[in-house]
Amino acid sequence: MTDENADSIVPPCDIIIDALDNFDTRHVLNRLAVKRNIPLVYGAVSGYRGQATTVIPGKTPCLCCIFPTSFKKEVFPVLGTTPGVIGTIQANEAIKYLAGQGELLENRLLLWDGLHALSVN
């Protein structure tokens, strides 16, 4: 996905859930969400660790504001449960937003450490 083709790849929607594997493409998706003025639910994983937040254009910092540069690409196995935990958190964020209920991860970055079974936000 690139800035040039993102509009044609991502159909009209009410919310975008990031399930990408690199920050370069996440930044493209972030710019599209800001352009369309729709929320982006971000999630990333590496090994036993993961993180998530919800970006609301015009209300919270965008993903490029939080992570202005891409991280070094690493080849590291991801424990299968880590994307399950982060993906469930992302799905929960989307449901809360669409239902208008609960407190979103706005202006907070949830950090999951599956090795030590804790989260910090």
Image: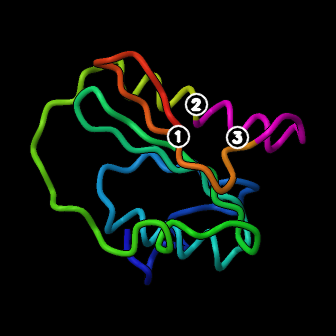
Q: Which residue is drawn at 42% across and 31% down?
A: 112
What kind of residue is marked 3? Ala
Mark 3 is surrounded, within 10 Å at the Cα level, by few (under 14), some (14 to 19) or many (20 or more) other residues, namely many
Give SS at disc 3: helix
What kind of residue is marked 1? Leu
Residue under numbered circle 1: 110
| Coordinates of residue 78 in the picture (x, y in percent) | 22, 29
For the view shown, which residue lies furthest in the bottom direction?
4
Residue under numbered circle 3: 94
Q: Residue at x 70, y 40 (%)?
A: 94
Q: Which residue is drawn at 32% across and 32% down?
A: 49
Q: Quadrant of the C terminus?
A: top right
Q: In this view, does 91 lie above or below 62?
A: above
Q: In this view, does 9 lie above or below 75?
A: below
Mark on residue 89? 2
Q: Answer yes or no: do the residues labelled 1 and 2 have beta carbons within 8 Å?
A: yes
Magenta stretch containing residue 99, yes or no? yes
The reply, left or right, for residue 98 in relation to residue 43 is: right
Mark on residue 12? none
Which region shows up in magenta? 90-103
Q: Quadrant of residue 76?
A: top left
- Mark before the other along the chain sequence, 3 or 1: 3
